Image (spheres, rainbow, N blue to C red):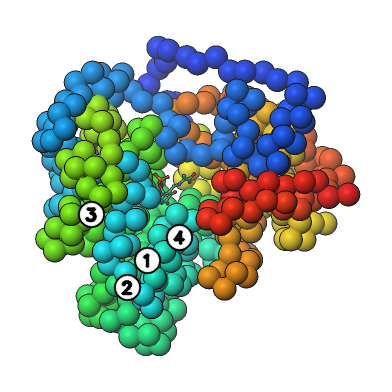
Amino acid sequence: MKTQIKKSWAEPYRMKMVELLKMTTRAQRQKAIKEAGYNTFLLKSAEVYIDLLTDSGTSAMSDRQWAGMMVGDEAYAGSSNFYHLEETIRKYYGYKYIIPTHQGRGAENILSKILIKKGDIVPGNMYFTTTRLHQELAGGTFTDIIIDEAHDPLNPHPFKGNVDLTKLDKVVKKYGAKRIPYISIATNVNMAGGQPISMKNLKELRAYTKKNGIRIIHDMTRVAENAYFIQQREKGYQNKSIAQIVKEICSYTDGATMSAKKDALVNIGGFLATNEWDVYEEARNMVVVYEGLHTYGGLAGRDMEAMAIGIVESLDDFHQHARVGQVEYLGHKMMEFGIPIVQPIGGHGIFVDAKAFLPHLTQDQFPAQTLAAEIYADSGVRTMERGVVSAGRKANGENYYPKLELVRFTIPRRVYTQAHMDVIAESTYNVFKQRDKIKGLKMVYEPKYLRFFQARFEKLG
Ligand code: PLI
């Protein structure tokens, strides 16, 4: 059962090692961001003061996880750390068969290749960059079936990750269930601003998919954060622990891909899970082609051990309360300054609405890319674009124009303090005060895949 936690959220840990931060001058940062083509992914980390690029692989491991690294069994085959990981995933998530992968996209690659045929349709609760790309490379087409509220930054809906079952039904009627290999369901939807799906919605979706013979594949990268919101907001879950809620979520799905670099508190690692023997057998065959043997999947034994321990730590109620509490603290600070952010405040970061922040820029002038570059130049805080650049192009070459044009301030777990949050909000406000003077960008180099990682820009005017 859930332990009673206090209203305020002091971190349930203390520090015994620190990493010194680097301070830079404004002139150094202006030079650095210009050289990086106004893309924060192309900055060197030595040029960054507070790094909010991503929460992926950037969290701090615990002393227990580090101790786990020391008991790495680096046998090529049958490492005992693999069996510990397998047992942990079965116990806490409930999936039957597990294939480790080097990270989330390794699992997405294998699963998409197994389940998707050319011409298939994959409905999902908002796209994610790597997930959709693997679906497309396998011959599928992603279709968005998230509720409309998710595309509106200010809509206060408590479960903006929910599926609109009417939209889904239209897709199923149009294409037929046979052309839909699975429904792609993310918990705590990243691109919507870290927004949860409710248990009620998931149960309804399960009933619908059972009736129509369609699988649900769960992108469980941030499932514990989603469970925290269910515990806080959904009737009937207040007295359930995060661990209980996570297990229930997984029970309504048929398989999963996981980037353990987020919730599960490791610097590298992921896995594919399924309850179907046939899918497992095929995945076990394919993992040796793309990742490594099925008992290590591109990971060292020590990485699997750290992951097994991190999974258990991620399900602790005090941990999630402090984790999301810190994000909410930053969000409230931003709102006090009048900075437009996605609401409700999400699980893994603050998403600033760049269209509202820079209303004088059109989407073709890349408002979110521009704002991320300006914030870095002003303060050394590194954020990232989640808008038209991240959305990329359709198969026919046209740009996607997403309604959400956001700058993500992603908070690594157990890394920064409340005082850092104050500095971040104050720095953003400094840019906000001078927003009228900010000019947009033009793209001068565009890579073919996942362009946001490597695209380069120049300042307009
Ligand atoms: O970065 P990977 O390959 O371990 O995982 C890919 C991935 C899959 N699903 C979701 C929801 C993600 O957020 C995700 C990776 N996200 C990154 C890198 C991020 O910065 O959000």
Quadrant for residue 356, please give it: bottom right
Q: Give the distance between the C-alpha atoms of the residues marked 2 and 1, in whole angstroms.
A: 7 Å
The circle on residue 286 is 3
Q: Is residue 131 above or below residue 49?
A: below
Q: Residue at x 17, y 52 (%)?
A: 284
Look at mark 4 in the image and give the residue it sits on.
133
Q: Give the distance between the C-alpha atoms of the residues marked 3 and 1, in whole angstroms.
A: 14 Å
Relative depth, front residue between 141 and 291: 291
First in sequence, mark 3 or 2: give its number. Answer: 2
Q: Secondary structure at mark 4?
A: helix
Dots 1 and 4: beta carbons under 8 Å? no
First in sequence, mark 4 or 3: give its number. Answer: 4
Percent position of residue 315, x then y: 29, 39
The circle on residue 138 is 1
Is 85 left or right of 163, judged from the image as shown?
left
Q: Give the distance between the C-alpha atoms of the residues marked 4 and 3, in whole angstroms.
A: 19 Å
Q: Is residue 327 above or below residue 114?
A: above
First in sequence, mark 2 or 1: give its number. Answer: 2
Q: Is residue 368 above or below residue 327?
A: below
The circle on residue 117 is 2
Q: Residue at x 29, y 59 (%)?
A: 111
Q: Secondary structure at mark 2?
A: loop
Q: Amino acid at mark 3?
A: Met
Percent position of residue 307, x then y: 27, 34
